[in-house]
Amino acid sequence: MHIPDGYLGPQTYLTTYAAMGPLWFYAGRRVKKSLSKKLLPRLALAGAFSFVVMMFNLPVLGGSTGHAVGSALIAIIFGPWAALMAVSVALIIQALAFGDGGITALGANCLTMAVIMPFTASWIYRSVAGKTDVLGLRQKLAGFLAGYISINFAAVAAGFLLGIQPMLASANGRPQYAPYPLSVAVPAMAGGHLLFFGIVEGLVTALVLTYLARSRVLEWPRLTVAPLSPQRNER
Amino acid sequence: MKKLYLGIGALVLLSPLGLLAKGSAWGEWTAADLKKMVGYAPRGLAALETLWRAPLAGYAFPGAINGPAAAFGYVVSGAIGVALIFGVFILLGRFLVKDEDDDNT
C-alpha cells in the first residue's frame, strides 16, 4: 500500500500533503498535551511495531504481495491521534531510509495508513466492543473487525488515489502517472486486502489486544488510552 | 514493557520470512516493470521515480538483493529502522515533553 514516487501526479500529492499538514500539526499538539516520559517509549514502540509488521510481506494469488500495517492495533490502544503520529513516523523512515513509499507520495501514504486506517479502526472497535469486558469474546471480535475493515478502507483509498491518475494527467491517451483507471485500481487494491491481508491485520489486532489485556504489560486499557482521547475517559 | 521490546526484537529477527513472498505489491512496480505490463513507461512516473535514492532501498544493502545477504540486510534494515524510529521519538520528547518526575517502566 506504499505508493511510490511517480504514481501520483502533482495535483494529488500536493493535495494530500496539504491535507496532512494540519492533521500532523493537530496530532502533534494533541499528543504533546498528554505526552509523558512514560508514554513516549510506548509510542516509539508502537511506531516500531508498525514498521516491523510492514516488513512481513505476504504472497497473494496472482504473484502480488502485501502486508498488515498494525495501525488498527495502535489506534485502539493509544487512540487515533497517537496512532497518526506513530505510524507517520514509521512511514517517513520507510520512505527516507528504505525507499518504501515515495517522498512525494508520503502525504498520500500517511493519509491512507496513518489517518483513514486508525480512525476507522478506532471507531469500529468502540462501536463493537462497547463497554464489554476486555477479555470477552466481543472484544476479540471488535479487534478483528477493526483491523479487517480499517485496512480495507485504507486500501480502497489508496486504490482511489491511484485510479484517478489517468483522468487527471494523460497525454495522447497515455496516463502520465499510475496507469490503471479506477475500475482496475480499486478492485485490485481491495481484492488482496479483503481476501487476505485484512484477515491478517484482524488476527494480529485481536491476538495482540488479547495478550495485552491478559498480561497487563502495557497497563492497557486502564492507563494509556485515557490521556490521549479525553472523550473516552469514562472507561 | 521489557517483553514488548523483546517482541519487537523477535519480529526483526524473523522479518526475512517477509522475503519469501516473491513479486511486488500492486501499484509498486518500477517504470521498467510497467513497460512490460502496459507497453510503455508513463512519462511522469519515469521522471519522478528516481527522485529519491534511499540509502538502503528495498531494505537491502546496495547490490545484495539475493540469498543470505538479502536476509542479513533485511534484519539489519529492520534494526536500523526501529532504532531510527526510537531516535525520532527521543528527539520529539526532548522538544515536547514537559519535565515531570515520572516512573519509568
Image (cartoon, helix red, strand yellow):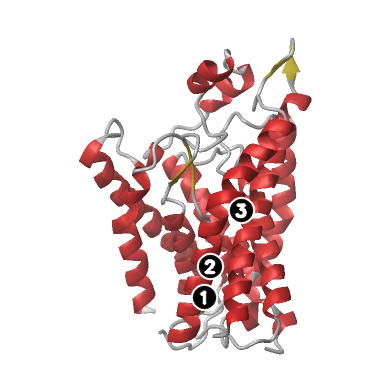
Q: Judging from the image, what secondary structure is the residue with disc 2 in?
A: helix
Does residue A22 appear left or right of residue A139 in this picture? right
Residue wearing tag 1: A209
Q: Say above or below: A174 vs B69.
A: above
Between A198 and A97, which is closer to the camera in this rendering?
A198
What residue is disc 2 on? Answer: A205
Q: Label 3: how many residues lie within 10 Å, few (<14), some (14-19) or many (20+)?
A: many
Residue type highlighted by circle 2: Thr
Question: Secondary structure beneath disc 1?
Answer: helix
Q: Nearer the viewer, mark 3 or mark 1?
A: 1
Label 2, label 1: how far apart the Cα atoms are: 6 Å
- Measured along the vertical axis of the image, is residue B105 above or below residue A67? below
Q: Quadrant of the N terminus of chain A?
A: top right
At x 55%, y 36%, the residue is B26
> Is disc 2 in contact with disc 1, using a CB cutoff of under 8 Å?
yes
Residue at 62%, 16% (x, y): give it.
Answer: B43
- Image location of residue B49, percent across then percent down: 53, 27
Query: How far apart are labels 3 and 2 at the CA level?
Result: 15 Å
* Quarter containing the C terminus of chain A: bottom right
**Mark 2 neighbour density, 10 Å: few (under 14) some (14–19) many (20 or more):** many
Query: Dot 3 corresponds to which residue?
Result: A113
Q: Look at discs 3 and 2 and give the one toward the viewer.
A: 2
